[in-house]
Image (spheres, coloured by chain):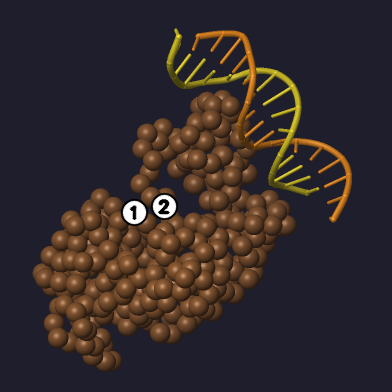
Chain colours: A brown, B orange, C yellow
DNA sequence: CCTTCGTTCCGCCATG
DNA sequence: CACATGGCGGAACGAA
């Protein structure tokens, strides 16, 4: 059984702590057996969790046998991370364990140096501070979570749910993840719709001569681009562009571009009150109808439903975990 | 839901 | 000859 160990440091945010406990703890395989064994460990006897104290049954040594270590946020991200915790996390990573942070848990992870040279995210309000303190970490504040293979990080509290479900999907497939989401009363759309929430595909498939073009595409996604435009930018023929794209990105140019547009649209639906039609127009869909239809086929629900589902869940999160 | 029209994208092949 | 490019045409797809 896959071993999950959650590291509870003093000041641990209860919401972040319970997210992995609940999600992984509820995940079931097809035959009904638990998909994970979940343990919470701590440095000392008791953990100060703010409004309450927590007694854990395991010490940090539990981390050594973990397949995945989860690092929840702590109430003061600026606080020094205990050396024992740093050492334990470094050992775990050295031993091949997967490590994921939730919310400002990214500060703890960054303190180990493991994030150096990697992309990561954290709670939006703390992103600038993280980037300032750890310049070697490539901080992306605009995404729900980042998957760098064995190093993952998620944004604000609610995004921790997405991250955990993402891991369930990676480990046991979409069906198990969907069932877990259902049991946890998560809106389905976030796990049903594929990887639209993953900010960056895992390690950029090297040899990306198209990399600059991709960057340019992302920046100009709002403009009405045609294949010819893109080919011109890449200074190659449309034929070659199509071929290279398939080889390097594994997708066709326009299909990929639309995915970027939809990702941006999701973000706008989450973060703003702009009307659906406006959002569609702003990310580069000429016709509102087309926008709605494409959104639906890729994400699984209509833009309106998506916004509602997201709002209801972040409200809950904001209520339970007003972080920093 | 259907229909029309333009675009995309890929197999095939010539060319560098 | 191995390899990459790009033009051509048509089937499939997307936009309206």
Q: Residue at x 56, y 67 (%)?
A: A189
Looking at marks 2 and 1 on the same chain, the residue that comes earlier in the sequence is marked by 1
In this figure, which residue is indicated by the disc labeled 2?
A: A200
Judged from the image, the secondary structure of the residue bearing numbered disc 1 is: loop
Vertical side of A31 occupied by A254: above or below: above
Q: Residue at x 19, y 79 (%)?
A: A58
Return the chain for callout 1. A
Vertical side of A197 occupied by A231: above or below: above
Q: Measured from the top left, where is residue C12 in percent x and y?
A: 71, 39
Location of residue A72 (image quadrant): bottom left
In this figure, which residue is indicated by the disc labeled 1?
A: A148
Vertical side of A77 occupied by A257: above or below: above
Neighbour tally class for label 1: few under 14, some 14-19, many 20 plus, Cα within 10 Å: some
Q: Are marks 2 and 1 in contact (CB under 8 Å)?
A: yes
Q: Measured from the top left, where is residue A317 in percent x and y?
A: 44, 80
Number of the front mark, 2 or 1: 1
Judged from the image, the secondary structure of the residue bearing numbered disc 2 is: loop
Res A263 label: none
Q: Nearer the viewer, residue B6 or A55?
A: A55
The C terminus of chain A sits in image quarter: bottom left
Residue A48 visible from this viewpoint: no
């Amino acid at each position: 059984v896959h071993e999950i160990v959650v590291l509870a440091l003093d000041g641990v945010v209860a919401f972040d702590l319970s997210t992995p406990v609940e999600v992984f703890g509820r995940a079931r395989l097809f035959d009904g057996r638990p998909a994970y064994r979940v343990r919470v460990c701590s440095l000392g006897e008791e953990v100060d969790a703010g409004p309450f104290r927590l007694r854990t049954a395991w010490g940090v040594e539990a981390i050594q046998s973990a397949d995945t270590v989860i690092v929840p946020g702590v109430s003061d991200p600026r606080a020094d991370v205990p050396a024992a915790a740093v050492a334990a996390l470094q050992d775990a990573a050295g031993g091949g364990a997967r490590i994921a942070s939730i919310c400002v848990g990214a500060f703890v992870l960054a303190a180990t140096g493991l994030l150096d040279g990697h992309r990561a995210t954290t709670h939006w309000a703390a992103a600038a501070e993280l980037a300032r303190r750890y310049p070697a970490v490539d901080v992306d504040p605009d995404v729900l979570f980042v998957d760098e293979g064995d190093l993952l990080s998620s944004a604000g509290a609610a995004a921790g749910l997405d991250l955990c479900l993402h891991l369930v999907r990676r480990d046991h497939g979409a069906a198990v993840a969907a069932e877990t989401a259902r049991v946890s009363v998560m809106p389905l759309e976030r796990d049903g719709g594929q990887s639209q929430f993953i900010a960056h595909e895992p390690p950029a498939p090297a040899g990306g001569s198209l990399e600059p073009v991709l960057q340019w595409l992302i920046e100009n996604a709002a403009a009405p681009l045609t294949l010819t435009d893109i080919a011109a930018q890449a200074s190659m023929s449309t034929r070659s562009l199509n071929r290279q794209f398939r080889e390097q990105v594994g997708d066709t140019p326009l299909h990929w571009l639309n995915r970027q547009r939809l990702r941006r649209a999701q973000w706008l639906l989450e973060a703003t009150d702009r009307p659906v039609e406006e959002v569609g127009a702003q990310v580069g869909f000429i016709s509102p109808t087309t926008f709605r239809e494409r959104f639906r086929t890729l994400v699984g629900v209509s833009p309106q439903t998506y916004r509602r589902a997201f709002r209801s869940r972040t409200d809950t999160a904001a209520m339970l975990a007003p972080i920093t």
